[in-house]
Image (cartoon, rainbow, N blue to C red):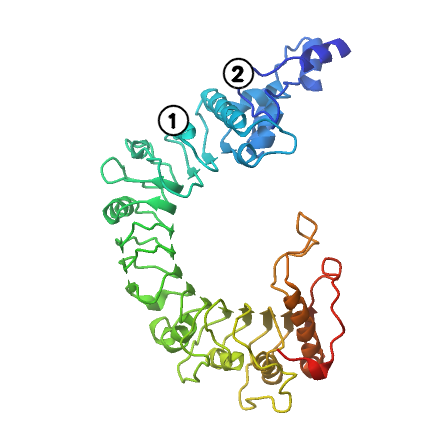
């Protein structure tokens, strides 16, 4: 038995059918105990069909890396590897290096190409449903092989195709012929990033395509229109950093529910004839003309641009009256105070406002009460601010009179979170108003940090960096909260004040004197 095991351990997969680990030329193919036992007992490694089916099912559920390793140590898994339904390949280690692999980058790149060649040439193509290829810092050496890799991977049974070249400029021309002649009939999800895509002539009818993501893709208005007109089942469309799109025209796609347009710098017009849009995500400026048809059906909006806070308060209640979820992000506003208006968001349940940047923004946080007053159904409110260059009046500098609106009452608001909470007087006033006017409040969280992951969950074991002046301000914010806000918290409300991690930020911050606390 020991001799048989040693002989098996010396066998290597020479046909490229398994992914080798970084720094190794090939992965050893180790026979498992059950296959060796079967050979010794006269079964020649043959499993009962039911057992083989179970093993294939288990193997199909493994991520690519672990499935390849399993194939290198088991004959049963090696057989199912050739029809593995999911392949996810990336050259991350080859580009960014690995502690266990000291070879030159060019050699690692050649090794990656060789391994992918071996994997795909030894894959039967049968049963392949998901193919993901991610290439960082794509070079001409990769482009020479991409066409052949895609032609092997994309079959009439392929359901998900993701090609992410992660390059700064699109140089590779995606072969649109792959999606013609019924090859794309089963395709349900298509993601292309950093390539040229011109599907006007060769594209077929993508009758099963439900999700389409294009990121940093060079595609003309006409080509995109041709693609969309052949995608009748489309439910989700997201375009990100596609700088060649000027006029986005969406045909009458009855199943389209979500539209996302993010940072397409040349975009001037968005026209949609889709009749059932209910979710929008836009990172486009207000000067982009939007013609979205029946906007009363829209229930979820995520909008990022300049002056969006003022726009949202003054325009959205009438143009999108049935909003239930609203997220707005603004780095610049022409006004520093929002007006109180009679218009209302009658159905809004979730509101997130992100403010701040390097230009002027709303400085009177108390004026955000205008949103709360306009949203009688609101249950969750999140405010995230970023440090500004403009100075804000500290509550410690002018603590005598805090503004209130005693006549206002919020009866459904349950959860409030303020991220990057600091000692600005108007922010303290906002928190106090919420406590005094909300009878339904269950939780108030004031986070004096930027809200990112802490050392307890970060792989590095450290919190994200904070400048010393932000640490000092976090101390002021904590003191402001304890002095002016905590005494107003009812016993029925869960109150959380989050400070910078004392372990990661054990800096010499002197104890603060309330009299000298000012911004």
- First in residue order: circle 2 vs circle 1: 2
Q: Which residue is mark 2?
A: 15
Q: Nearer the viewer, mark 2 or mark 1?
A: 1
> Which residue is at the front of the view, 195 or 410?
195
In this rendering, would 412 be left or right of 218?
Answer: right
Check the picture and name the quadrant holding the N terminus.
top right
**Numbered circles on residues, count:** 2
Q: Helix, strand or loop at disc 1?
A: helix
- Tell me if I can see residue 161 in this picture: yes
Q: Quadrant of the C terminus?
A: bottom right
Q: 290 or 386, which is in the foreground?
A: 386
Tag 2 near tag 1, CB within 8 Å: no
Q: For label 1, count other residues whose C-alpha is less than 10 Å away and answer few (under 14), some (14-19) or many (20+).
A: few
Number of other residues with Cα within 10 Å of mark 2, as a class: few under 14, some 14 to 19, many 20 or more: few
Rendering coords of residue 184 (x, y %):
34, 35
Identify the element where label 2 is drawn: loop
The residue nearer to you, when weighing 325 against 311, is 311
34 up-or-down from 435: above or below: above
444, 419: nearer the viewer: 419
Read off the residue under disc 1. Answer: 144
Q: Quadrant of residue 399?
A: bottom right
């Amino acid at each position: 038995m020991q001799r048989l095991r040693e002989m098996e351990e010396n066998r290597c997969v020479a046909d490229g059918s398994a992914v080798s680990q970084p720094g190794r030329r090939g992965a050893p193919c180790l026979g498992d105990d059950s296959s060796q036992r079967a050979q010794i007992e006269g079964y020649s490694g043959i499993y009962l069909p039911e057992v083989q089916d179970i093993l294939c099912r288990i193997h199909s559920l493994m991520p690519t890396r672990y499935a390849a390793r399993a194939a290198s140590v088991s004959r049963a898994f090696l057989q199912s590897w050739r029809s593995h339904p999911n392949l996810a390949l990336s050259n991350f280690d080859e580009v960014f290096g690995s502690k266990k692999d000291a070879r030159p980058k060019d050699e690692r790149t050649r090794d990656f190409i060789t391994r992918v060649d071996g994997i795909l040439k030894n894959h039967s193509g049968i049963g392949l449903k998901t193919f993901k290829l991610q290439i960082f810092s794509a070079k001409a050496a990769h482009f020479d092989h991409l066409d052949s890799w895609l032609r092997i991977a994309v079959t009439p049974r392929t359901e998900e195709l993701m090609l992410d070249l992660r390059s700064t400029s699109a140089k590779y021309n995606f072969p649109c012929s792959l999606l013609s002649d019924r090859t794309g009939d089963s395709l349900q999800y298509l993601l292309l990033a950093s390539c040229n895509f011109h599907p006007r002539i060769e594209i077929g009818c993508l009758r099963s395509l439900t999700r389409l993501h294009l990121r940093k893709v060079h595609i003309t208005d006409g080509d995109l229109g041709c693609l969309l007109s052949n995608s009748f089942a489309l439910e989700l469309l997201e375009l990100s950093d596609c700088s060649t799109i000027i006029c986005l025209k969406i045909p009458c796609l009855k199943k389209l529910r979500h539209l996302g347009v993010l940072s397409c710098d040349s975009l001037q017009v968005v026209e949609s004839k889709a009749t059932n849009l209910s979710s929008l995500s836009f990172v486009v400026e207000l000067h982009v003309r939007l013609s979205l048809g029946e906007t009363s059906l829209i229930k979820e909006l995520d909008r990022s641009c300049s002056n969006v806070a003022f726009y949202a308060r003054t325009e959205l209640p009438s143009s999108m009256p049935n909003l239930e979820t609203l997220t707005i992000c603004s780095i610049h506003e022409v006004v520093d105070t929002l007006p109180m208006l009679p218009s209302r968001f009658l159905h809004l349940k979730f509101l997130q406002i992100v403010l701040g940047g390097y230009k002027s923004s709303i400085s009177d946080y108390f004026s955000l009460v205008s949103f709360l007053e306009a949203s009688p159904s609101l249950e969750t409110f999140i405010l995230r601010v970023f440090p500004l260059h403009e100075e804000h009046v500290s509550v410690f500098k002018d603590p005598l009179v805090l503004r209130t609106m005693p006549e206002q009452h919020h009866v459904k608001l349950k959860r409030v979170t303020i991220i990057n909470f600091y000692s600005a007087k108007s922010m303290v006033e906002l928190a106090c108003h919420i406590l005094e006017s909300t009878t339904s409040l269950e939780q108030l969280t004031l986070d004096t940090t930027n809200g990112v992951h802490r050392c307890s969950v970060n792989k590095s074991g450290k919190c994200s960096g904070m400048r010393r002046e932000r640490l000092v301000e976090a101390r002021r914010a904590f003191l402001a909260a304890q002095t002016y806000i905590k005494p107003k918290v009812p016993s029925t409300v869960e109150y959380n004040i989050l400070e910078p991690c004392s372990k990661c930020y054990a800096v010499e911050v002197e104890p603060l004197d309330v009299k000298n606390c000012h911004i």
